[in-house]
Image: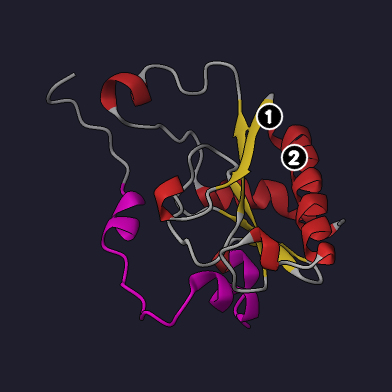
């Protein structure tokens, strides 16, 4: 596979991404942002958390459920926050099954940098839709994932269903 090129220009935004100050948190900024949710890929806002499309997805439809509270530990969330995160996770799974035809899911938290958390100080639930054969050979041989759809197209497909929550 040496010499082959997979074009993925959206990754450069992540690679070159502006380094935020030590005190800023993108998840807190999005939680309080007055900007248009479609621009930021926010699908739904609830009382204490929100659903966001991952800008650097593992797979098409990769969502994050994020509490408004800035914390890296589950134990610091209230029981209401825990319940809302799980309710939004469940609703997100149902929507992804209905709209994208997802056949399975990987759901979970990466708690701490050593566990793979890119933003370790603000926990978030990953919801990664899966399909039989979705990974094919690319991650194993080429160390690369392929994305069959642009983020804005997926956002448009999902947005109406989240409005009903």
Compared across the picture, whether 19 is left or right of 152 comes to: left
Between residues 58 and 108, which one lies in front from this camera angle? 108
The residue wearing badge 1 is 102
Q: Where residue 130 sits in the image (x, y, percent)?
A: 60, 28
The residue wearing badge 2 is 93
Residue at 51%, 39% in the rendered image? 149
View extreme (front): residue: 75
Between residues 43 and 126, which one lies in front from this camera angle? 126
Q: Where residue 39 sits in the image (x, y, percent)?
A: 56, 67
Q: Where residue 111 sits in the image (x, y, percent)?
A: 53, 53
Over which residues does the magenta segment extend?
9-38
Residue 5 lies in quadrant: top left
Residue 164: say if magenta.
Answer: no
Residue at 39%, 32% in the rendered image? 145
Residue 165 lies in quadrant: bottom right
Q: Are marks 2 and 1 in contact (CB under 8 Å)?
A: yes
Q: Where residue 126 sits in the image (x, y, percent)?
A: 60, 47
Compared across the picture, whether 56 is left or right of 89 comes to: left
Up the image or down, 79 lies above or below 135; here it is below
């Amino acid at each position: 596979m040496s010499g082959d090129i997979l074009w993925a220009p959206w990754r450069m935004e992540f690679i070159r991404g502006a380094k935020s100050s030590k005190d800023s948190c993108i998840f807190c900024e999005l939680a309080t942002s007055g900007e248009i949710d479609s621009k930021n890929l926010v699908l739904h806002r609830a009382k204490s958390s929100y659903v966001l499309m991952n800008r650097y997805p593992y797979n098409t439809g990769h969502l994050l459920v994020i509490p408004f509270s800035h914390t890296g530990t589950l134990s610091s969330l209230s029981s209401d926050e825990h319940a809302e995160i799980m309710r939004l996770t469940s609703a997100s799974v149902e929507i992804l099954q209905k709209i994208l035809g997802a056949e399975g899911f990987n759901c979970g938290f990466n708690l701490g940098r050593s566990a793979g958390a890119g933003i370790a100080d603000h926990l978030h639930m990953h919801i990664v839709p899966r399909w039989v054969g979705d990974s094919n050979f690319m991650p194993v041989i080429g160390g690369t994932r392929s994305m069959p759809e642009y983020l804005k197209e997926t956002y448009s497909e999902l947005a109406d269903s989240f409005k009903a929550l």
